[in-house]
Amino acid sequence: MARLGVLALQGGYDAHARTLRGLGHTVDEVRTADDLARVDGLVLPGGESTTHLILIDRFALEAPLRAFVASGKPVLATCCGLILSAAEVVSPAQRSFGWVDVTVARNAWGRQVHSFEDTADPESPVGPVSMLFIRAPRITRVGPAVEVRATYRGEPVLVRQGNVTAGAFHPELTADARVHEAVFGRG
Amino acid sequence: MDVSTFPAKVGLAEMLKGGVIMDVVNVEQARIAQEAGACAVMALERVPAQIRKDGGVARASDPAMIKAIQAAVSIPVMAKCRIGHFVEARILEALEVDFIDESEVLTPADEDFHIEKHGFKVPFVCGCRDLGEALRRIGEGAAMLRTKGEAGTGNIVEGVRHLRTLRSQIRRLTQLSPEELMTEAKNLGAPYDLVKWVAANGKLPVPNFAAGGIATPADAALCMALGAEAVFVGSGIFLSEDSRKRAKAIVDATTYWQDAKKLAEISTGLGAGMPGIEMGKLTEADRMAKRGW
């Protein structure tokens, strides 16, 4: 059984932990480099990307996170996690870690009143998964090394580069665990 | 595409967990809050301590001020309406605020009825002092709760009382046998289906945050330790001596609430906190937590 971690600085860590436990995994909340050293896979959850960047800087977590991604262990990044993982972030421009060669526009579906549920296009490699978009970002450019894992109305919403899978929606907030299972398997 | 479903509303509350929502009264404070790491701001004209001092009727904020704050920050912007004032709520919805707080900090518009919140596209957060009040608000459509505490006092005692009450009432429900639940629903004044859900799951069906009286990083960490999933800070930041420093410290403490060594560093050298009020000095009429039912 894999021991998985969910970055728990702020945001949707609780819901991801529930989904992973449902798949039979042991789950740790990760707040320090020591916590990170103990896990075999990591979720970068939704939440506020500005808050995450500030806490990652203030508590010197960037180097350990970069080392974790470089180690090849599986990583699932959702919403704010996608924004942190992208090569480029716009509207407004913001620093990011460049693990997935995509450009991401923040809050591009509008404010909370425009948040919505739907399912992925049926031809999506990961399947027609349930999706919940909350003040969600949009992937506006996909680099050549990036594989598109799910689309919504033809537009990429879940992508993968190497060991990092990143999505604009919240698979942890639906009863559909297929995205988590595709990344981490069952425990 | 199903827009503004209840899961989408609760989903935003999930995204705020482990974070700090800060009261701000202008663009400059909103920017300070975002730079300090706030996960959202609450736009209002006066913080609760100021409302207490000024007296009179406190109402929803000027839309111009809310719009200016929405334009200035990228994090979610919340705003308050008076209890029962569904027209103020509609105005806030038209402004596309991200959350409406139907708040006891403003002067209630209706002493009998809270807003029917399912009919709105925007999610609502409401205050509670105990489980019955929490479940009544969820029954009306609230997507997030916050314990009320006593806003604008810089005194955590009421917040602690409300968090402990909620936790112990939830624990009690999980111990009851099925035939006891209807009577418990009657005693709590809460919807039966929600009482059954809490009894089966041992928690509330929506996130619960803490509010009211948080003035220090240790206060925020205490609330987290008592089961709050995030904190609202009103007067505690911008009425303190060094608001930038204190805002950051409260953000850090809400993430690292379990780590006393980090809390000791975080709490060091913050300057004076906001002046506090002892509960015994408040008259019954001064108690905001008693507003709503």
Image (spheres, rainbow, N blue to C red):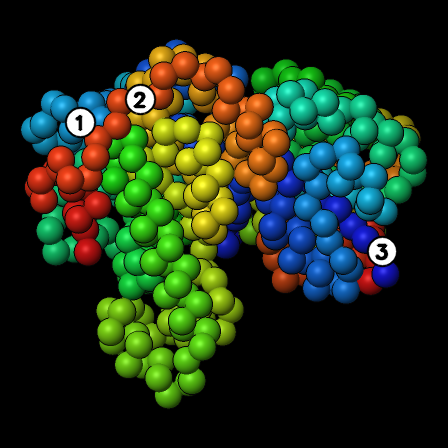
- The quadrant of the image that shows the N terminus of chain A is bottom right
* Amino acid beneath label 3: Ala
Left or right for A136, reference B78: right
Q: Secondary structure at mark 3?
A: loop
Q: Position of residue B258 (x, y in %)?
A: 58, 41
- What residue is drawn where x is 75% and y is 46%? A5
Q: Which residue is mark 3?
A: A2
Question: In the image as oriented, which residue stretches furthest toward the bottom?
Answer: B179
Q: Residue placed at 61% from the left, 31% from the top?
A: B261
Badge 1, how many Cα within 10 Å: few under 14, some, many 20+? some
Could you tell me which residue is drawn at 70 percent across and 64 percent down? A22
Tell me the quarter of the picture where residue B259 sits: top right
**Residue identifier under label 2:** B274
- Going by the numbered disc 1, the residue's amino acid type is Ile
Q: Are marks 2 and 1 in contact (CB under 8 Å)?
A: no
Residue B1: % across, % down: 55, 50
